[in-house]
Image (cartoon, rainbow, N blue to C red):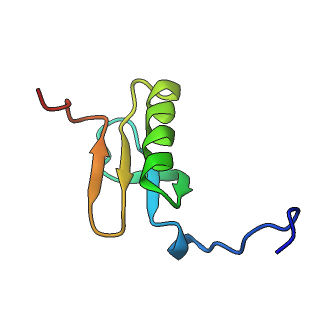
Amino acid sequence: MSRTSVPNNTPEELPYRIELWHDGGREEVERVLARALSAQLAHAIFQAAKGEHPHRRITLSTSDEILADSATPPPD
C-alpha cells in the first residue's frame, strides 16, 4: 500500500461506533457519527461528539454492547 492509498476498511473492520440518538424520546439511533478501529480513538471521538451535541444522547458501541452513554452519569 502506498502512502496515498486509502485502506479498504469496511464497517465490519471498524468495530466501534459513535451514534447520535433521535431527540424527543424516540429510542432509536438517528445516525452513526463515526466508526473507529481502536478503543482509544473511539473514546476521543465520543468525547468530541458529546461536546458538539451537548443536549443529545450519544453512545459508543460495539456490535454487541454499549460501552459509553452520554445519558448515563459516570460512576463515582
Number of labelled discs?
A: 0
Residue 46: give x, y in percent of width and height.
44, 40
Image point (42%, 24%), residue name = 54
Q: Nearer the viewer, residue 49 or 42?
A: 42
**As drawn, is 14 to the left or to the right of 76?**
right
Question: In the picture, residue 15 is in which quadrant?
Answer: bottom left
Quadrant that contains the C terminus: top left
Q: Residue furthest left?
A: 76
- Residue 23 is situated, as x and y percent measured from the top left of the image, at 39, 37
Give how far across and how far down residue 41 sits, in percent: 51, 47
Residue sitting at x 44%, y 59% = 16
Q: Quadrant of residue 75?
A: top left
Quarter assignment of residue 50: top left
Which residue is nearer to you in this view: 53 or 23?
A: 53
Q: Residue furthest front?
A: 2
The residue at the point 39 percent across, 25 percent down is 55
When the figure is inspected, residue 22 is found, relative to residue 7, above or below; the finding is above
Q: Is residue 36 left or right of residue 65?
A: right
Q: Residue at x 56, y 70 (%)?
A: 11
Residue 8 left/right relative to 14: right
The quarter of the picture where the N terminus appears is bottom right
Q: Position of residue 13 (x, y in %)?
A: 53, 73
